[in-house]
């Protein structure tokens, strides 16, 4: 009985069809979150490489070293994943076929940036970390150009 009433109401007063370019039609996109996370990847990579290994036999120094190293690695990997997530949201939710006309390398740029995020998780490479920052900067420039806005690139460090 209730189902029939609901069906009748839906037939008499159908919900309007809506369209959104993503899961949540907020329309708020900004590559800055990817930049901040990528910058953390660069920072943690440098800290990992600069961390001094303690002399053997000093258990307290070794425990402190291992604790610090594990924290740096965890943060690096977490931030690389955040960078990837933020880039994938821009790629799959914001950019549309019309943007490919102006940026025919858009898909390749995002694909390579996502691969760099994975590389930064798997290895400790200042080269790949910097390449990731460069890719995020390129995406930043493409993104703001699609909005016809000149938003300066800057880094926090």
Image: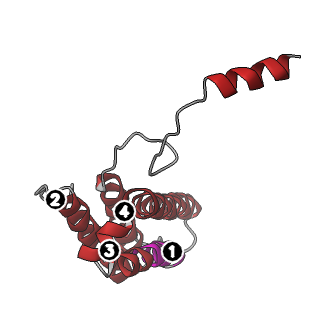
Residue appearing at x 39%, y 81% in the figure: 108
Q: Closer to the N terminus: mark 4 or mark 1?
A: 4
- Residue at image mark 3: 100
Relative to 18, 147 lies left or right: left
Marks 4 and 1 in Cβ contact (< 8 Å): no
Residue situated in front as seen by the camera: 15 or 101: 15
- Of marks 3 and 2, which one's residue comes earlier in the chain? 3
Earlier in the chain: of badge 2 and badge 1, it is 1
- Name the one closer to the observer, 55 or 123: 123
Which residue corresponds to mark 2? 154
Location of mark 4 (residue)? 95
Q: Earlier in the sequence, mark 2 or mark 4?
A: 4
Q: How far is disc 1 from disc 3 in space, using C-alphas? A: 25 Å
Task: Point out which mark residue 118 bears.
Answer: 1
Mark 2 near mark 4, Cβ–Cβ under 8 Å?
Answer: no
Identify the magenta region.
Answer: 113-122
Q: Which residue: 36% across, 62% down? A: 95
- Real-space Cα separation, disc 2 to disc 4, in angstroms: 22 Å
Mark 3–mark 4 CB contact (< 8 Å): yes
- Residue 94 in picture, x, y percent from top left: 38, 57
The stretch drawn in magenta includes residue 121? yes
Callout 1 environment at 10 Å: few (<14), some (14 to 19), or many (20+)? some
């Amino acid at each position: 009985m209730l189902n029939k009433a609901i069906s009748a109401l839906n037939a008499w007063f159908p919900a309007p069809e809506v369209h959104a370019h993503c899961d949540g039609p907020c329309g708020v996109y900004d590559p800055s979150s990817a930049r901040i996370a990528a910058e953390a990847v660069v920072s943690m990579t440098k800290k990992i490489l600069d961390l001094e290994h303690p002399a053997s036999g000093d258990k307290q120094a070794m425990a402190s070293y291992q604790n610090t190293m594990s924290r740096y690695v965890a943060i690096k990997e977490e931030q690389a994943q955040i960078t990837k997530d933020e880039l994938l949201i821009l790629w799959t939710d914001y950019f549309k076929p019309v943007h490919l006309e102006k940026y025919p390398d858009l898909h390749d740029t995002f694909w390579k940036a996502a691969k760099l995020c994975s590389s930064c998780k798997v290895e400790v490479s200042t080269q790949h970390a910097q390449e990731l920052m460069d890719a995020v900067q390129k995406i930043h420039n493409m993104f703001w150009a699609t909005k016809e806005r000149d938003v300066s690139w800057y880094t926090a460090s």
